Image (cartoon, rainbow, N blue to C red):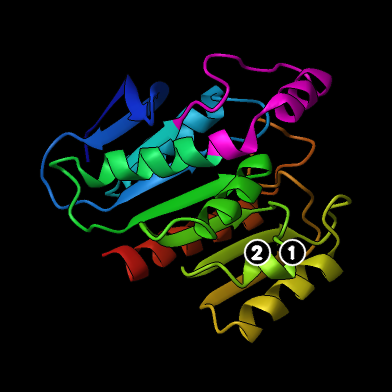
Amino acid sequence: MGIDGTKILFPSNEHTTPGYLVKPTEGKGFPGVVVIQEWWGITEHVKDVTERFASAGFVAMAPDLYHGEVAAEPNEAKKLAMALDRERAIEEISSAAKYLAELDEVGPEKIGIVGWCMGGGLCLSTAAHNEVIGAAVVFYGRPLDANDTAKVNTPVLGHYGELDDGIPVSMVRDFEAELERNEIPNAIHVYANAQHAFFNDTRPQAYNEDAARDAWERTLDWFKKYLV
């Protein structure tokens, strides 16, 4: 399937937000997916993943929550993440979903969201504050607390690494239990011998090919189940 990627500006309340939009070159009625960046920003890896979604039959867009800034090393990424206005970021993610839903090429009204690391946490927070979202997928994003988990009204697929020092398995299982307690459709996977950032193939120290492949297949299946 041919795809076409372009940089855009989309409206978000009284300002605009840049984003990277990728569409299949032919056809209509595609489900839409908002791709939420890691703490590095809109890197080539994020663009590549956005293009992968389009190649799989989605209209995908990565909103640039740093508005042009990209970090090259962890200290810089940490500064950008700490400076991020989370409420504004959630607003921009929600606006990206609304923008996708209004495109001629997008069929279902419900939009999927997926995020990694910092973006995974933002994905969950958006799912707790937006009714346009039809399905959410989080890759090693910090779980919500019990109060916010109760507000989620969309199916949640979670991918976590057994060896993630920042998000212990016990925290993941507590989150899973809260999803179950609130009767929120979910599937939480903890990958053996996988670290934080196991999906990022540009980070060889963390990348786990088997876990990444399985998580990707499950992600596509999740969106096809709840968005199509």
Query: What's under tag 1, amino acid-wise?
Result: Asp
Query: What's under tag 2, amino acid-wise?
Result: Asp
As for residue 79 lying within the magenta part, the answer is yes
| Label number found at residue 184 | none
Rendered residue at 25%/47% (across/down) = 101
As for residue 88 lying within the magenta part, the answer is yes
Q: In this rendering, would 204 be left or right of 25? A: right
Asked if the residue under mark 1 is in contact with the one under mark 2, i.e. CB atoms within 8 Å, the reply is yes
Picture layout, residue 98 above or below residue 157: above
Q: In this rendering, would 102 be left or right of 37? A: left
Rendered residue at 86%/50% (across/down) = 166
Task: Report which quarter residue 187 is drawn in.
Answer: bottom right
Residue found at the very far right of the displayed protein: 165
| Label number found at residue 148 | 2
Q: Secondary structure at mark 2?
A: helix
For mark 1, does the 10 Å Cα neighbourhood hold few (<14), some (14 to 19), or many (20 or more) residues?
few
Residue found at the very far front of the displayed protein: 14
Q: Quadrant of the N terminus?
A: top left
For mark 2, does the 10 Å Cα neighbourhood hold few (<14), some (14 to 19), or many (20 or more) residues?
some
> Residue 176 placed where, x, y %?
69, 75
| Label number found at residue 145 | 1
Stretch of the chain drawn in magenta? 63-89
